[in-house]
Amino acid sequence: MKTPHTAHLFIVGRVNLPIQTEMQEDSGRMWKTKATVPSMYALNFYSDLYLDVLRANRKTLTIRLGDKRSKYQDGEIVWITIGQRFGRRQKLFAAVIDRAEVKTISELSRREIERENPEFRSHEDVIALLGRIYNDQISPEHLVTVVHFSPIDE
């Protein structure tokens, strides 16, 4: 007989994640047969320029090149972090992904552009930013994923 059981795993003194385990009874003894730990994801921002606007809740979305809906799921809990891709990162806060939608750069609204960066006003600003980040020629017809997120107060 298999019985689900929830335990908690304490990792590196910082994260307490629930583990779903499956127990099987054999001759009156219980055996652990499977354990899974939920994944924790991060929305990382490479530039320290975003630090102040993230902390002030003036940045509530990110625009990522390509269709990333399979990577960013509505309702998912993520950490918002600042730091280099393969370097040390700083966790700013936890957030929930409210919505991830795919559109072309030319379809971005003025509000979405300003929520990406409060200093941005045009599609050209977004194209220049994505060109620097992805080191590629970007056009208004490129697909992007607009990931809306809300901070979680802890």
Image: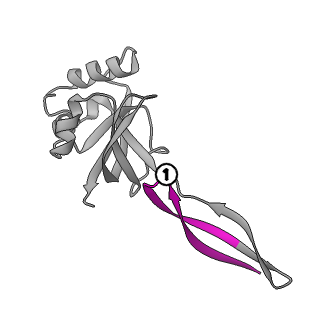
Residue that appears at 35% across and 32% down: 83
Residue 6 belongs to magenta span: yes
- The percent coordinates of residue 51 (x first, y second) are 22, 36
Closer to us: 113 or 92: 92
Q: Is residue 133 left or right of residue 117?
A: right
Residue 145 visible in the shown view = no
- Relative height, residue 53 to residue 5 (above, below): above
Secondary structure type for disc 1: loop
Q: Residue 86: x and y, percent?
A: 46, 28
Q: x%, y% of residue 19?
A: 57, 64
Task: Residue 64 in the image: state x and y as whole percent.
Answer: 37, 33
Q: Residue at x 45, y 47 (%)?
A: 41
Q: Nearer the viewer, residue 66 or 53?
A: 53
Name the residue carrying label 1. Answer: 12
Residue range highlighted in magenta: 1-22
> Which amino acid type corresponds to the residue marked 1 in the rendered image?
Val
Q: Nearer the viewer, residue 29 or 55?
A: 29
> Does the magenta segment cover residue 8?
yes
The quarter of the picture where the C terminus appears is bottom left
